[in-house]
Image: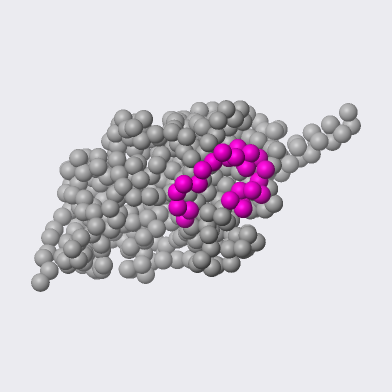
């Protein structure tokens, strides 16, 4: 016979959104139980944080512990993003941005970073249960009941006043409650690993910036290179499946991912030169069809946080930022619910969260269609516009005062056209000299 437990809030998942939500709830004095299927530390991608994250980490009381362990875990100071397309180079310094707030952050190994946040949430009084799995949930009751299996496979139930799903790509509640909705993004695949990068005295490479490289033969494909402070990098490539098929992927399970990755790398001369001494010493992994959406993000007694609700694309490292923003928005509303006050989750949570996601989405779509690439690599960009773009790349997608956020898609198209015309005039001017 299973036992019945009770708590104020259960959080499914101990990633950044779960730990930050737990920390915020503990600061308000609520009893919090966090249920995590895996054991930490565990490997995860998404290593490049954005400066906007620092605001949310500080709010939750988690920033101090991250900063304190940065040297121990070789977290890399980050102040911007660099871009490479053939011989074209560009960079944005996040300290030179339109929006107020921090202009620097860290590039982190997510295994250690996520574990640090979870440990700090635990020190603040969160009951964390690693190796436990939620198998069913009844949210029709005034107080939801979860079915859980513990580390030994023993079953128990837990009744909660409110339920938060921070399970990331596990998407526990969307699956159990049939909330999943198809993403309108094309299905893309990421192939990735950690490497000993071997980059020594390269004048064009800045370890304090993520490097995003457009593939030389297919501008829909791109590489990420995220340096850590100890000479290692997170390295990955993202593209649609037809791109990988050209390299012999063809959906087979027997493909040697490391050799595939090296063949793709060899097709970019500049990046190959940068990584000529790299050592592939970690298992190469792949993830496909990661973009996701749901029918709605919250109900009467539950809410979805971070990637459990929606994930766009890794190109601008928005995942952790959206996750932390969702916790920052949700916890004050959970507080109201637990105090017996009414909450309009659509108006007060979903719409504000999706407002920033919509801005990120416009730039992600424009990256793959080429408009934003043309903006990024333009050498004729007004400094004020650069500051506005830098704010977006730094994660400040909810800054309504940024002029390029309003009607982002339309304004981005206009900006791309301006940059193209300026480049064309510059080229004609050179030809006539």
Question: Relative to residue 43, is residue 79 depicted above or below?
Answer: above
Q: Residue at x 25, y 46 (%)?
A: 22
Q: How many marks are shown on the rendered structure?
A: 0
The answer to whether residue 276 is magenta is yes
Q: Look at the image and give the residue range highlighted in magenta.
A: 262-285
Question: Relative to residue 35, is residue 400 depicted above or below?
Answer: above
Q: Residue at x 29, y 49 (%)?
A: 40
Give the left or right position of residue 89, taking residue 30 as reference: right
Asked if residue 311 can be seen in this view, the reply is yes
Asked if residue 404 can be seen in this view, the reply is no
The C terminus sits in image quarter: top right
Residue 309 in picture, x, y percent from top left: 40, 57
Please state which of residues 242 and 267 is positioned toward the viewer in this rendering. Answer: 267
Give the left or right position of residue 341, taking residue 366 as reference: left
Q: Residue at x 25, y 62 (%)?
A: 133
Please state which of residues 421 and 228 is positioned toward the viewer in this rendering. Answer: 228
Give the left or right position of residue 328, taking residue 190 as reference: left
Choose top left, top right, bottom left or bottom right for residue 143.
bottom left
């Amino acid at each position: 016979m299973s036992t019945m437990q009770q708590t104020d809030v259960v959080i499914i998942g101990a990633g950044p959104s779960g730990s930050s939500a737990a920390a915020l709830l503990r600061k308000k004095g609520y009893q919090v139980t966090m249920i995590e299927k895996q054991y930490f530390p565990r490997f995860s991608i998404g290593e490049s944080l954005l400066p906007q994250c620092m605001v949310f980490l500080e709010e939750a009381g988690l920033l101090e512990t991250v900063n304190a362990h940065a040297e121990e875990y070789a977290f890399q100071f980050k102040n911007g993003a660099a871009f490479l397309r053939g011989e074209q180079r560009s960079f944005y310094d996040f300290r030179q941005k339109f929006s107020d707030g921090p202009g620097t952050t860290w590039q982190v190994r997510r295994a250690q970073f996520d574990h640090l946040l979870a440990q700090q949430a635990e020190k603040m009084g969160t009951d964390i249960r690693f190796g436990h799995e939620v198998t069913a949930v009844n949210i029709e009751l005034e107080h939801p009941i979860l079915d859980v299996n513990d580390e030994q496979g023993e079953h128990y139930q837990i009744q909660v006043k409110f339920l938060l799903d921070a399970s990331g790509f596990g998407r526990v509640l969307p699956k159990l409650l049939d909330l999943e909705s198809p993403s309108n993004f094309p299905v893309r695949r990421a192939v990735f690993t950690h490497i000993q990068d071997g980059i020594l005295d390269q004048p064009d490479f800045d370890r304090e910036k993520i490097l995003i490289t457009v593939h030389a033969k297919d501008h829909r494909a791109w590489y990420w290179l995220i340096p850590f402070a100890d000479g290692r990098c997170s390295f990955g490539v993202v593209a649609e499946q037809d791109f990988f098929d050209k390299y012999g992927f063809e959906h087979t399970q027997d493909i040697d991912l490391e050799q595939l990755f090296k063949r793709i790398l060899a097709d970019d001369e500049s990046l190959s030169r940068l990584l000529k001494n790299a050592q592939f010493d970690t298992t190469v992994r792949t993830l496909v069809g990661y973009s996701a959406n749901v029918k709605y993000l919250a109900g009467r007694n539950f809410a979805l946080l971070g990637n459990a609700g929606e994930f766009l694309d890794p190109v601008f490292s928005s995942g952790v930022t959206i996750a932390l923003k969702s916790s920052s928005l949700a916890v004050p509303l959970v507080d109201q619910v637990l105090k017996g006050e009414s909450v309009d989750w659509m108006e007060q949570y979903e719409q504000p969260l999706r407002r920033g996601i919509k801005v990120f989405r416009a730039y992600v779509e424009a990256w793959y269609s080429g408009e934003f690439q043309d903006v990024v690599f333009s050498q004729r960009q007004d400094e004020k516009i650069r500051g506005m773009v830098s704010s977006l790349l730094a994660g400040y997608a909810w800054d309504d005062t940024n002029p390029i956020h309003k009607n982002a898609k339309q304004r981005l198209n206009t900006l791309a056209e301006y940059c193209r015309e300026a480049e064309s005039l510059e080229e004609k001017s050179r030809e006539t000299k």
